[in-house]
Image (tube, rainbow, N blue to C red):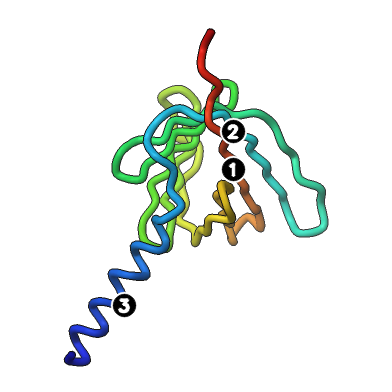
Amino acid sequence: MTVRRTACLLLLLAASAAGANTPAPGRYDGQFCVTVASDSAASCGPAEVDVLRGRELRVRISDIVYRLRLHSSQVEVVLMHGTMQIDEFVAAYDWAGTALQFHDLDKRTHYELRLTPRAPAR
């Protein structure tokens, strides 16, 4: 195998591994935790999560929506309040089981989104 083919194969495997834990499309209950600076306690609360096709997630907390687009190693984050964009940044991310973790280095903020499948409606 040539060096070029080996490098391409390794890149494809890395991209596949990064998306391997992305949950199937659908609705999930979430626990969203935000920690500002490393010396403060996490602030956590419930979230409604829609996992869309194309490795996109919509995380709703009250009237705030985080739009997340997952790439091979980075997540694009767009924070919305209604139709107004509040913030936007790109961060490295990782899956720890069913928890998506990412950091906004500029604001020294750590995010963790834990997903659980929704219970069937009765």
Q: Name the residue located 37 percent from the left edge and 35 percent from the top edge.
A: 25
Check disc 3 and give the amino acid type.
Leu
Q: Which residue is mark 1?
A: 113
Horizontally, residue 8 falls left or right of residue 51, namely left
- Of residue 110 and residue 51, the one placed in the foreground of this image is 51
Task: Give the mark nearer the N terminus: 1 vs 2.
Answer: 2
Task: Kindly check if marks 2 and 3 are in contact, taking CB atoms under 8 A apart as contact.
Answer: no
Task: Kindly check if marks 1 and 2 are in contact, taking CB atoms under 8 A apart as contact.
Answer: yes
Task: Give the mark nearer the N terminus: 2 vs 3.
Answer: 3
Task: Kindly check if marks 3 and 1 are in contact, taking CB atoms under 8 A apart as contact.
Answer: no
Query: Which quadrant is the N terminus positioned in?
Result: bottom left
Q: Name the residue located 53 percent from the left edge and 25 percent from the top edge.
A: 118
Residue 117 percent coordinates (x, y): 53, 31
Q: Name the residue located 22 percent from the left edge and 91 percent from the top edge.
A: 3
Q: Which residue is mark 2?
A: 30
Residue 76 percent coordinates (x, y): 41, 50
Q: Give neighbour class at mark 3: few <14, some 14-19, many 20+ (Cα, 10 Å).
A: few
| Residue 10, disc | 3
Residue 26 percent coordinates (x, y): 40, 30
* Secondary element at image label 1: strand
| Vertical placement of residue 75 versus 4, above or below | above
Horizontally, residue 122 falls left or right of residue 3, namely right
* Secondary element at image label 3: helix
> Gap in Å between the C-alphas at discs 3 and 1?
28 Å
Q: Give neighbour class at mark 2: few <14, some 14-19, many 20+ (Cα, 10 Å).
A: many
| Residue 64, disc | none
- Of residue 90 and residue 53, the one placed in the foreground of this image is 53
